[in-house]
Image (cartoon, rainbow, N blue to C red):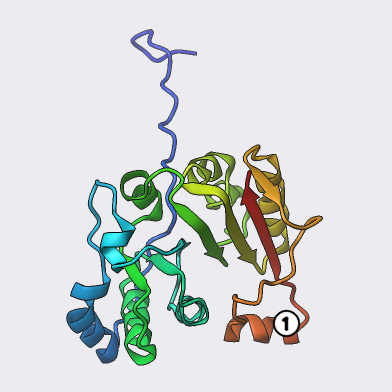
Amino acid sequence: MSDEQGQPPQDPPRRAIKSFVTRAGRMGTGQIKALAELGPKFVLPYEPERIDPEQVFGRKAPLVLEIGFGMGGATAEIAATLPDHDFIGCEVHEPGVGALLKLIDEKQLANIRIVQHDAVEVLRDMIGADLLAGVHIFFPDPWHKKRHNKRRLIQPEFVAKLVAHIAPGGYLHCATDWQPYAEQMLDVLTAEPHLLNTAASYADKPAYRPLTKFENRGIKLGHGVWDLVFRKR
C-alpha cells in the first residue's frame, strides 16, 4: 500500500526506552527545604560524562544503582544496613528526591547520591562498563493493561544495556507485587545470556531489602511479592 505520491508508508518511530512515566506531585515544606539545603551536596547533576565513584564518595567501595526509588524509604534503610556500600539512586520525581534527602539528613547517611534524571540516559552517559556491584529495581510500574505491557521497564533490550554496566559477579535484584510482571521478569532475565539466576525461579527476599508499608499491607491481604536475584556471569 502507498500514499497518493506513490511512496510507501513510513513505519512509526520506535518508542525510546524510558525508566519512568511523568507524574505530578506536591512538594512538602520539608522536602523543599531539603532540596535547597542538601541538594547541592547529595544530588549529582546529570552530565553526559562518566562519573568517578571514588571522587564522588571519597572512597573505594562497591557501587549499587537503584532505578526509581520512589519516596526513598527502602533506599535509606538499605544504605544504613550496608554502610560499606555506596548507592546512586535515580528518580525523576522531585517529591521523592526531597523525601530521600530528608532521610539522608535524619539518618546521617554519607553513602547515597541522587541523580534526578531518566536512568536509561544515566546508564548510557554516566555509568562506565562493568562498574556496578549491583542494581536494584523495586516495584517498577507494572503497566497492568495488556496493551501497555510494552511500556514495562524490564524488557530484553533494556536488560542487555543494563548488564553491560554490571561487573562480573555483580547482581541485578528486581521485585514486584504483580504476578504477570514477575513472570515476564523471570522470562526476560532467564533469557539474558550474561545473567544466571541465583534461585530455581524466584528468590527469597534478601535480608537487606526492607518491607515497605504498602508491601506489608498487601501481604496481610494475601497479595504476593516476587523477588528475582540474578548474577552476571
Q: Say if residue 140 shows up in the picture.
A: no
Q: Is residue 1 above or below residue 162?
A: above
Q: Where in the figure is residue 180, as x and y percent of width and height?
A: 71, 57
Q: What residue does disc 1 label?
A: 219
Residue 59 appears left or right of 77: left
Q: Say if residue 189 shows up in the picture.
A: yes
Q: Residue at x 46, y 62 (%)?
A: 62
Q: Where in the figure is residue 169, as x and y percent of width and height?
A: 59, 51
Q: Residues within 10 Å of mark 1 (few under 14, many from 20)?
A: some
| Amino acid beneath label 1 | Ile
Q: Nearer the viewer, residue 31 or 100?
A: 100
Q: Where in the figure is residue 57, as x and y percent of width and height?
A: 31, 67
Q: Residue at x 77, y 58 (%)?
A: 199
Q: Is residue 132 above or below residue 192?
A: below
Q: Which quadrant of the view contains residue 98?
A: bottom left
Q: Nearer the viewer, residue 158 or 209?
A: 209
Q: Where in the figure is residue 73, as x and y percent of width and height?
A: 47, 82
Q: Which quadrant of the view contains residue 46?
A: bottom left
Query: Which secondary structure, mark 1?
Result: helix
- The number of numbered badges drawn on the structure is 1
